[in-house]
Image (spheres, rainbow, N blue to C red):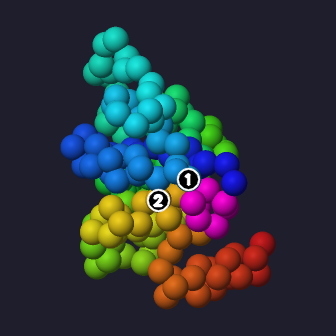
Amino acid sequence: MHPITVAIADADGNRRIRYEHSLQDDLGVVLLTDVASSNEAEFETRRAKPRTNITVAENELARAMRLNPRVLLVDLNLCSDVNFSMLGSLHRQCPATFVVLLVEGSGSISEEAIMQAMEAGARGYLSRETAHHELAKVAQVVGRGEIWAPRKMLGKIMDRVLRHEVLH
């Protein structure tokens, strides 16, 4: 089995580095990062000048397109505008990249928001509280084209898909 390429999009650089450290020792993952590491993670050089004319979300989208990972773990706060437009842009511009949302605790986001994010292209979500322990497993599962979501959400996702098919 080939390793899965993974990148992390998070406005909090320290949190991103912690997530990257939790993935560095997994042999099934090739971490794509802007931060030099000791385990030979693929390193992309930073831009000579920081971008000042775009938002943090736009910068992370550009970074994700440059890194072009198979799995992109995205902080929900970067893409939680009304229409989840960042997810739609990522899906259109990087169709081979699967997005997994990193969210605060389970009660901090509504199921409807999760459903909208998945309709916009997310392949699943996981809470930040469990992320450090599950990132490698999530990368493997989503990298194979599967969905990562709690079992209670799978029925709701299927119901929504079926309603959508009936309407069209």
Which residue is painted at 34% across and 53% down in the image?
A: 22
Looking at the picture, tell me which residue is in the foreground, 7 or 99: 7
Q: First in sequence, mark 2 or 1: give its number.
A: 1
Numbered tag placed on residue 28 in the rendering: 1
Quadrant where the N terminus is found in the figure? bottom right
Residue type highlighted by circle 1: Gly
Q: Are marks 2 and 1 in contact (CB under 8 Å)?
A: yes
Query: What residue is at 50 percent from the left and 64 percent from the top?
Result: 138
Q: Quadrant of residue 94?
A: top right
Answer above or below: position of 54 versus 109: above
Asked if residue 142 is among those painted magenta in the image, a careful observer would answer yes
What is the residue that sits farthest to the top in this orientation?
48
Q: Is residue 168 magenta?
A: no
Region of the chain picked out in magenta, as a range: 140-146
**Image coordinates for residue 104, horizontal then vertical, percent:** 28, 67
Q: Distance between the residues labelled 2 and 1?
A: 8 Å
Q: Is mark 1 on a helix, strand or loop?
A: loop
Element marked by disc 2: helix
Q: Residue tagged by mark 2?
A: 136
Give coordinates of residue 133: x percent, y percent: 36, 66
> Could you tell me which quadrant the C terminus lies in?
bottom right
Residue at 56% over, 53% down: 28
Q: Is any atom of residue 37 visible in this view?
A: yes
